[in-house]
Image: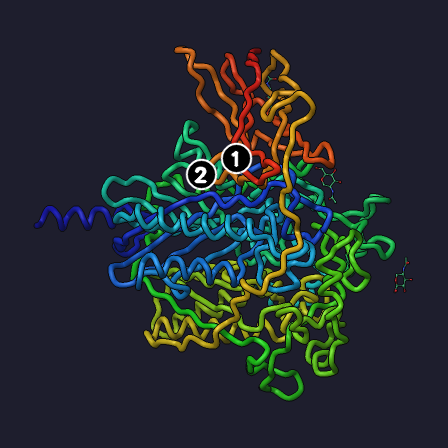
Amino acid sequence: MELLFRLVVLSSLVCHVCFAEPSVYQVGAGIADVTGPAADINMMGYANPAQLSAGIHTRQYSRAFIVDDGLQRVVFISVDCALMDQVIKTEVSRRLEAKYKGVYSAKNVVISGTHTHSGPGGYLQYVLFLVTSKGWVQQSFDALVQGIVQSVERAHDNMIPANIYYANDILIDANINRSPASYLNNPSWERAKYTYNTDKDMVQLKFVSTADGKPIGVINWYAVHCTSMNNTNPYISSDNKGYAGLLFEAEINGPDIMPGKGPFVAAFASTNLGDVSPNTMGAKCLDTGLPCDFVSSSCNNRTQLCIAFGPGKDMVESTKIIGDRQFQKAWNMYDVANTELEALEGPVQFAHQFVDMPNYNVEVQDPVNGPTMVKLCKPAMGYSFAAGTTDGPGAFDFTQGVTSPNDFWNLVGSALVEPSEEVKQCQSPKPVLLSTGEISWPYAWHPDIVETQILRIGQFLIAAVPGEFTTMAGRRLRDALNSEAINNGGPSSVKTVIAGLSNGYTHYITTFEEYQIQRYEGASTIYGPHTHSAYLDQYRKLTKSIFKNEAVDAGPTPPFLLDDQISLVPGVVFDRPAFERKFGDCLVQPYPFVRPNETVTATFVAGHPRNNLMLGNTFMTVEAKQSDNSWKVIRTDAHFDTFFFWERTSAVGQSEAHLRWIVPADTPEGEYRISHFGHYKNIDTSVVPYYGTSQSFSVGA
Ligand SMILES: *[C@@H]1O[C@H](CO)[C@@H](O)[C@H](O)[C@H]1NC(C)=O
Ligand SMILES: *[C@@H]1O[C@H](CO)[C@@H](O)[C@H](O)[C@H]1NC(C)=O
Ligand SMILES: *[C@@H]1O[C@H](CO)[C@@H](O)[C@H](O)[C@H]1NC(C)=O
């Protein structure tokens, strides 16, 4: 007894910062493939109708984490996709509820998109989000729903007793503000509280088994857009955050475990990245090389010419650098003794409510009249929305029609109406381009009812928000929730992280002051100038309900529009090989000798990638010959140094797969080969697997 007492005293003397005893939670982590159709589908994010998928650079994954304190359970899921949508959240919740009755529901599950702009679209339930994808894409939806559910199932099956540790640090050189003119409109006293005009804070949770100290996973939050890959990229890519996750997972799981297969799961999740770009060299005019106009981010009045670049020489290198910087910092935060970190301690709780945003009433401080009640607006987009951003300028103006033929737009565009006086006044000073809240044909264009949700793990709060909060909007929300928690009996060590693009999508949320500038982010704050005030009010209410242990009502039910969707993207008709060729034939063999740092290429007769998405599988491998003459897979299409590119070579169903492997500097000398896997479709619609393997080549100095 006395010895134990002395040990406790001793250990509390040696720790630098002394925290309470870590709580033991039941924790599980799971990862599953959600990669969408790798050909012919519009990428979600830039709204560039010309950006169609044509291969894979890195796969998209869903990473799920379950935490249970013995009484309550929460699930946080980060998905490599542009944004989460109501229809996916609802469908995933339904399937989980059906399989695990009373365990999971929309209320305790958060699904957050990483915001990669290089994932196939067409999985969102409101009309506006489907314009550039030409409507609904069932395969994108199915891949996401199945994979997200699977990641939760895996996490569920892996649950073990664990401690959770919190760490935070600063990462300077991986983000910049892309709308500094808006940021500068925030009050100077408020800006003076911060060194930077973006959040440089990185926050990380580390999950460690209590039985053997083995790592289970990490969740990392850092504010930056996944727009390192630009709006000309045809490869599916999880962008900088996905790459950071792959690096971390490979570090723990080891190089022999292929991406997406290991037990350790590292999610790099989105947060208040609304005005935050990874293109750290900033924007310049493409024609003159001079800085863009500061307020409008245009050159000669043309936004298309003002584009941000860097830090790499091309977009792949930029993705690599920004991903690597996030990983390096995250690793530094992880690779320390757990006693140096702050353990999470206390109960698991959650609060959830649907809210009718256009009818939300909130008290704001009017400079003339003092406290005043205001009502939010029906959703609408402003003119600057069509202009896009310096990460990806608007490819077309909705009012001018699109630049390429688009049957979906021809169909739904006729429903556009002039904004009513009510909407114009409510949204002022936003000049309304699209009065989406006033159109309901063929079904709703934008959400009215949104999902608001907070998860609590001890002193840590995850505020899941349905959109992109800007830097200052996010700072105000975190501060407000930390104070609200403390004022209602929460621990003084409480800390809030914002989980961006969660559960549903409502574009941007700027501060009232930023809204006045009406750049892209303000133009995309859809419920009007007081949107942010309403969210502050709503998330305070949820926080209070958690710490007072008072239930909130469910709120109104959002529409579920799965059956209303219109799909105009044609499917695969049939495939056929070139004359006297078979599927899987290697048309161009790799060069027989390569050195490290060189690129191996091979071309195969291919079928259409949409015949089978190869989920949990791969369209390509690189194999190394072993001493017993067997072949061992060392690369799949999910690795960062491989590229699978698909090309249609004729109008009558012929196509080719171009495979690339950039041989790493540390590749052992030896024999290697590269293979392509796929499925082709016959005229009778039967789908048949095929594969082909190249001649071997040797890697040597
Ligand atoms: C840009 O547009 C504004 C407003 O339409 C106009 O006043 C200005 O002259 C234009 N500038 C250039 C360089 O064309
Ligand atoms: C995209 O990046 C590539 C380099 O990887 C560059 O050549 C191209 O100009 C960029 N395009 C845009 C629109 O940023
Ligand atoms: C490969 O590239 C790295 C980094 O650019 C360089 O340090 C290394 O010397 C190169 N190795 C060979 C064999 O060319």
What is the CA distance from the residue labelled 1 to the residue labelled 2? 8 Å
In the image, what residue type sits under mark 1? Ala
Farthest residue toward the bottom? Answer: 369
- Using the image, determine if residue 3 lies above or below residue 489: above
Dot 2: element: loop
Residue 172 x/y as whole percent: 57, 47
Q: What residue occupies the far left of the structure in this picture?
A: 1
Q: Nearer the viewer, residue 113 or 290?
A: 113
Specify few, some or many for label 2: CA neighbours under 10 Å numbering under 14, 14-19, or 20 or more: many
Residue linked to disc 2: 260
Q: Quadrant of the C terminus?
A: top right
Q: Position of residue 497 (x, y in %)?
A: 46, 59
In the rendered view, does 341 fall on the left or right side of 63?
left
Q: Where's ligand 1: which quadrant?
A: bottom right
**Between discs 1 and 2, the one toward the N terminus:** 2
Q: Which mark is residue 369?
A: none
Inspect this view and state whether residue 313 appears: no
Q: Residue at x 44, y 38 (%)?
A: 260
Q: Is residue 93 left or right of residue 73?
A: right
For the residue marked with disc 2, what is the amino acid?
A: Gly
Q: Nearer the viewer, residue 260 or 547?
A: 260
The answer to whether 346 appears left or right of 36 in the picture is left
* Location of mark 1 (residue): 638
Q: Viewed as shown, does residue 50 lie left or right of 194?
A: right
Marks 1,2: beta carbons within 8 A: yes
Within 10 angstroms of label 1, few (less than 14), some, or many (20 or more) residues?
A: many
Check disc 1 and report its element: helix, strand or loop: loop
